[in-house]
Image (cartoon, rainbow, N blue to C red):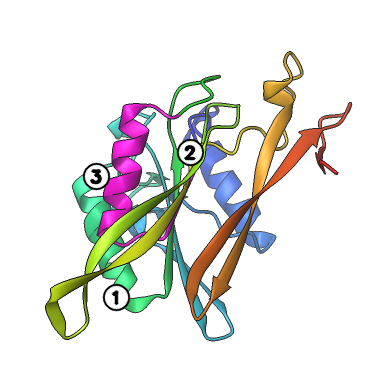
Amino acid sequence: NNHIFDYGRDALEDTITLLSANRIVPIGAGMNYAEANDPKIFALGSLRLAVFGFTNLMPRSLEATASHSGLSQFESELIKQRIGESKKENDIVIVSMHWGEEYQTYANTVQKQLAHEFINAGADLVIGHHPHVVEEVATYEVGEPRPGDTGREHTRTGYIAYSLGNFVFDQGFSDETREGLMLKVEVSNKKITNVEKVPIRMNATFQPEVVQ
């Protein structure tokens, strides 16, 4: 996210190392270009999930290269190409995006355009964060040719959570910043069939609790 370089490249590398040592897979940054940009693949039985992570809020100078650590490369055309290639080999493609405007409760034009482009390219779910408040959860329908019959189309549904808001964060100055979302994503026949919002609220010590 936009604070990963607050304490420089050494701290970025420490974060990656500590997460990996504790079996938490870092996404969107890496020790080199491939680590930062390649999707992370998760196998759940026979289901294959590919997860990308990007931000459009950081300078290009902090992107990883072949020889040094950094962030994933935010270049929308390359991202769409990677999504398309990944979709050919995996059942579900998820894109995590650090974007948007702080404290705005609705997504802006850039967020909507990017989300739609990523779903057009093959993404099934786009998850956003950065605004510190919850923004809308939406669906986006894509017309695709049916296998073996390019003259006809069927509809594929993509899901977008433009901002999940805060989860563990000490912003207690408003109701909006003390609230967030988790997503319950239902999968059937290796496709997302429903996305349910699970509201959370931070308690007095800023720990997230499910709203009953």
Query: Which residue corresponds to the image point at 68% horizontal and 22% vertical from the top-left?
Result: 176
Query: Residue 100 got which mark?
Result: none
Of the pair 4 and 172, the residue shown nearer to us: 172
Is 85 left or right of 31, judged from the image as shown? left
Q: Give the image location of residue 138, x and y in percent.
A: 47, 45
How far is mark 3 from mark 2, CA to CA? 17 Å
Task: Identify which amino acid the numbered label 2 is placed on.
Answer: Tyr
- Given the current orientation, which residue lies at the most extreme right position? 204
Query: Which residue corresponds to the image point at 15% horizontal and 82% vertical from the top-left?
Result: 149
The disc, 3 or 1, on the residue closer to the chain's N-terminal end is 3
- Tell how many labels: 3
Q: Which residue is mark 3?
A: 76
Compared with 144, 99 (above or below) is above
Is 121 left or right of 196, judged from the image as shown? left
Task: Identify which amino acid the numbered label 1 is placed on.
Answer: Lys
Query: Residue 88 got which mark?
Result: 1
The disc, 1 or 2, on the residue closer to the chain's N-terminal end is 1
For label 1, the crowd category at 10 Å Cα-Cα, with few meaning under 14, some 14 to 19 and many 20 or more, is few
Image quadrant where one finds the C terminus: top right
Query: Which residue corresponds to the image point at 60% horizontal and 27% vertical from the top-left?
Result: 133
Q: Which residue is mark 2?
A: 162
